Amino acid sequence: MVLETGSNQALVFGTNKQRLNVAASRLIWQVGFEWIPEAIDEVRVALGESIDHVVKASGLGVMLASEDAGRRVIEIVTRRAVLHAPDLQIWGVVGAAELTADTLNAALAAAQRDSHRHRADRCSVLTRDLNLPYTQLCAYTGRPAVTTVIEGREGDTVARPVSAGVHEFWSQARNARKSLVNRLQAAVSDAEDRAVLDRAVVSRSALESGDGVSAKGWVAVLHADGNGIGEIFANLRHCYTGSELIDRMRSVSEALESAAWAGVARAIVTVGRTAGSGWVLPILVGGDDITVLLDGRYGFAFTTALAAELEVLLEQDIVTTTLARVRAVQGSSGGEVTAPRRVTVAAGLVFTKPHHPFSHGVELAEKLTRCAKTVKVFEVSALDTVVLYESAVRELDAIRADLRTAAGVPLWAGPIILGTAPPELAHRGVDRLWEAMSLLAVGGDTETTPDLVPSGVVHDLRGVLTAPHPDDARLRAVEDRARVLGAERGYSPALTRLLDDHLFVDAPDGRFSRLLTAMELADVGTGTGAIG
């Protein structure tokens, strides 16, 4: 039996209201870790039957049970969703096969196919309550409103109309923040680290008042997932049979869930020791899917810390031995060996202004994650990033079409290799980006850092790089002017390194510029507008 939720992204990221994002995320987690187990316990008692809960994940459950027991579990969970989560899409299917060690693999595959087919045939929950001319609309989703909620700080509140689904999330938001922090704290053992986690995550009062993540001009949206995890689950039933398959599915799922929470918690602690309070809000954490909202000043540092933690956490025996088995089976069949030797991380990081549509930031972050995956064949973790100075909602391809020279050279540094880059990708290593950033006098501070490139010079360089499709002649003119003005000044060595090593990089995989990305990350790292 397979029971799962759908359209999770639309449910969680359909509004910029962070208290609703957290509550929706908690709901999806509850389905996999509370609702389904509670329904299983109820049916076990009622029927006196054994039910094996094989896969327990956020918004997903895979179970071995009789047809009657399976249908009862689905009925209990879906009824609960109708009553308490009207915006949640959830369904279940029960396989018809009589299970034996020989038929288990085929039965699991058939149940998953049936689940996908059922999802395609379902009507959206949006069709339940249609907007009519006389309907008052929800202030957050545009759906029909059924009641009101009170938003704001004490003494400065306002009543807002909300839909049935938003009303449910609103009432659950307090517990959602507490549940989130508890799960993060469970992944660390040190009392001081637990205190850092509680301080770093956006406070309940900030969520309730509508302030959300604290930010000095920029917020960051991070999406990350694991390279190689899809290969594991796509090939498990070809590598194991019977009880060994069941045990492997269960163990791998548990390992991934544990690693995801531990990785996020440890990365928050690493950055949070010096970052202050209320700067991070994990939205989705589970398996290989992580989405985090951050104060822009800490987005880049948190991403590098998260990738490093996840690589270590996923280097555990159950994951590496499973990948080795998948590789062996792929090789023995004469086909291409696509499974990696280890799990790495691909991440997309988007910086926007605080009121930019959250759903657009998440969409861009997911597309950037796919860009980062272009180097996964080297078995490295990677990041791609973009800083949105504009308020327009545009596709990534359209944004980057404007970030090329007249000759077509890309003016961004991604994909950026996190950790130690192999020799063939050394030019894309994160250390080279940090090096470029270290040469810039950020925040207009030139008096205390006379040996760094000042903001005026950076401003001129930025101007030509961000102009529509700059040609080589214009680029050379601005570069030559900067060198002449900087001659015999204290920042001359830094300027020379910046222009020689980072303005343009001639690499085996094509020419690109590292400089604009370094400038932008330096900008958001200070929480200000553009340098200069």
Image (tube, rainbow, N blue to C red):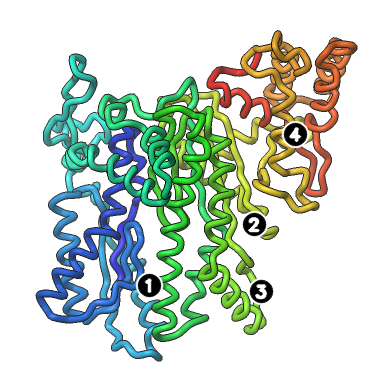
- Residue drawn at x 13%, y 52% is 83
Contact, mark 4 vs mark 1 (Cβ under 8 Å) = no
What type is the residue that disc 4 sits on?
Answer: Ser
Q: Which mark is residue 513?
A: 4
- Residue drawn at x 51%, y 81% is 238
Contact, mark 2 vs mark 4 (Cβ under 8 Å) = no
Question: Mark 2 to mark 3: distance in Å?
Answer: 16 Å
Question: Mark 1 to mark 3: distance in Å?
Answer: 24 Å
What residue would you read off at disc 3? 336
- Pair 2/4: label in front: 2
What type is the residue that disc 3 sits on?
Answer: Glu
Label 2 vs 3, first from the N-terminus: 3
As helix, strand or loop, the secondary structure at mark 3 comes to: loop
What residue would you read off at disc 2? 376
Label 1 vs 3, first from the N-terminus: 1
As helix, strand or loop, the secondary structure at mark 4 comes to: loop
What type is the residue that disc 1 sits on?
Answer: Arg
As helix, strand or loop, the secondary structure at mark 1 comes to: helix
What residue would you read off at disc 1? 113
Front residue (pair 333, 191) = 191
Question: Mark 2 to mark 4: distance in Å?
Answer: 21 Å
Query: Dividing the image into 4 quarters, which one contains the C terminus?
Result: top right
The answer to whether residue 312 is visible is: yes
Question: Mark 4 to mark 1: distance in Å?
Answer: 45 Å
Measured as percent of width and height from the top left, residue 512 is found at 76, 38
